[in-house]
Image (cartoon, helix red, strand yellow):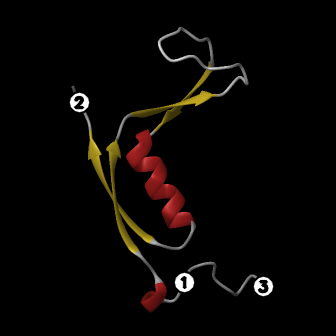
């Protein structure tokens, strides 16, 4: 792909997607590989992403060339 070409889809092929999720933070848990037993406690690595799931999913869709409108929940 040359510099003059765009990564976006033609307007008639774009999807218009609404994302609903948090607008503040998103936590991602990393699977450690240990056996998981329901009802038991497990230690895992936690990654904090600012922006929340609604923002992060919208960003991924926009990067893929689709139109995304995030509906964000902020507050208690």
> Residues at badges 3 and 1 in contact (C-beta under 8 Å)?
no
Q: Tell me if residue 2 comes above or below residue 75 in the rendering.
A: below
Specify few, some or many for label 3: CA neighbours under 10 Å numbering under 14, 14-19, or 20 or more. few
Q: Tell me if residue 2 comes above or below residue 20 in the rendering.
A: below
Q: Which quarter of the figure is the C terminus placed in?
A: top left
Q: Where is residue 57? Give x, y as percent.
A: 47, 53
Q: Which tag, 2 or 1, sits closer to the chain's start? A: 1
Q: Where is residue 24? Give x, y as percent.
A: 37, 35
Q: Where is residue 31? Give x, y as percent.
A: 66, 27
> Residues at badges 3 and 2 in contact (C-beta under 8 Å)?
no
For residue 9, which numbered disc appears in the image?
1
The image quarter in which residue 68 lies: bottom left
The image quarter in which residue 46 lies: top right
Towards the viewer: 21 or 39: 39
Q: Which tag, 3 or 2, sits closer to the chain's start? A: 3
**Residue furthest out toward the top:** 41
Towards the viewer: 5 or 69: 69
Element assignment for label 2: loop
Instruction: Quickly name the residue at label 2.
Output: 75
**Residue furthest out toward the right:** 2
Element assignment for label 1: loop
């Amino acid at each position: 792909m040359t510099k003059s070409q765009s990564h976006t889809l033609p307007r008639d092929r774009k999807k218009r997607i609404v994302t609903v999720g948090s607008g503040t933070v998103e936590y991602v848990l990393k699977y450690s590989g240990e056996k998981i037993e329901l009802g038991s406690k497990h230690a895992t690595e936690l990654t904090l992403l600012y922006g929340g799931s609604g923002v992060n999913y919208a960003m991924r869709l926009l990067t893929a060339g689709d139109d995304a409108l995030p509906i964000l929940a902020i507050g208690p």
